[in-house]
Image (cartoon, rainbow, N blue to C red):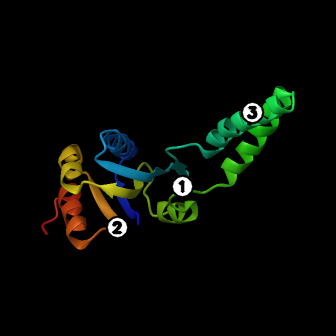
């Protein structure tokens, strides 16, 4: 089962920095993320989701491969690549993995312009080592929502908010 964590920052840059740091920790096998999305709100009040992975592009690449393979089998690789890329792009665009986009946009409405929220869906985490590596974010954010255990949530709040458990 995955855990959802939503953290808010007063600026956009810190949200993107947190996502980059989490990606680095994932490469070091300290955590495994299913999704990490930064949500921002511009001066006109428009909420924007900054997905970590472009599903449409990923679908097009995968579809191109399968289309090429089928095209080679039927002696027309170019048609196969085009058809596969198109089908893959449509499939990728219609796929919504991770945190629900509607939920993120609704929560993003509460942002002040220029702020950010980071939605993280974690599969696995080595809590103490991850918190140790997130010291640069001490007292910079607010935990809005989690599905973590009470102890883990308190440790995260203590780090980001300076809250006393």
Quadrant housing the C terminus? bottom left
* Left or right: 129 in relation to 54: left
In this view, the residue in front, 97 or 51, is 97
Q: CA distance from mark 1 to mark 2?
A: 25 Å
Tell me the mark number nearer the camera, choosing from 1 and 3.
3
In the picture of the structure, the residue carrying the numbered disc 3 is: 69
**Residue, x 32% and y 50% (percent of image)?**
31
In the picture of the structure, the residue carrying the numbered disc 2 is: 146
Quadrant housing the N terminus? bottom left
Residue 45's disc is: 1
First in residue order: circle 1 vs circle 2: 1
Tell me the mark number nearer the camera, choosing from 3 and 2.
3
First in residue order: circle 3 vs circle 2: 3
Q: Residue furthest left?
A: 164
In this view, the residue in front, 114 or 76, is 76
In this view, the residue in front, 30 or 108, is 30
Q: Secondary structure at mark 1?
A: loop
């Amino acid at each position: 089962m995955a855990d959802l964590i939503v953290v808010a920052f007063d600026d956009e840059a810190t949200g993107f920095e947190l996502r980059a740091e989490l990606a680095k920790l994932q490469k070091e096998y300290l955590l495994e993320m299913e999704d990490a999305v930064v949500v921002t709100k511009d001066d006109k009040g428009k909420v924007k989701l900054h997905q970590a992975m472009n599903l449409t592009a990923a679908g097009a690449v995968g579809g191109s491969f399968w289309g090429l393979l089928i095209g080679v089998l039927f002696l027309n690789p170019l048609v196969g690549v085009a058809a596969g890329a198109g089908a893959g792009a449509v499939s990728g665009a219609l796929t919504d993995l991770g945190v629900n986009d509607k939920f993120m946009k609704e929560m993003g409405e509460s942002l002040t312009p220029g702020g950010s929220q980071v939605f993280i869906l974690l599969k696995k985490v080595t809590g103490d080592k991850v918190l140790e590596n997130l010291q640069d974010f001490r007292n910079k954010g607010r935990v809005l929502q989690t599905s973590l255990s009470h102890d883990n949530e308190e440790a995260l709040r203590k780090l980001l908010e300076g809250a006393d458990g």
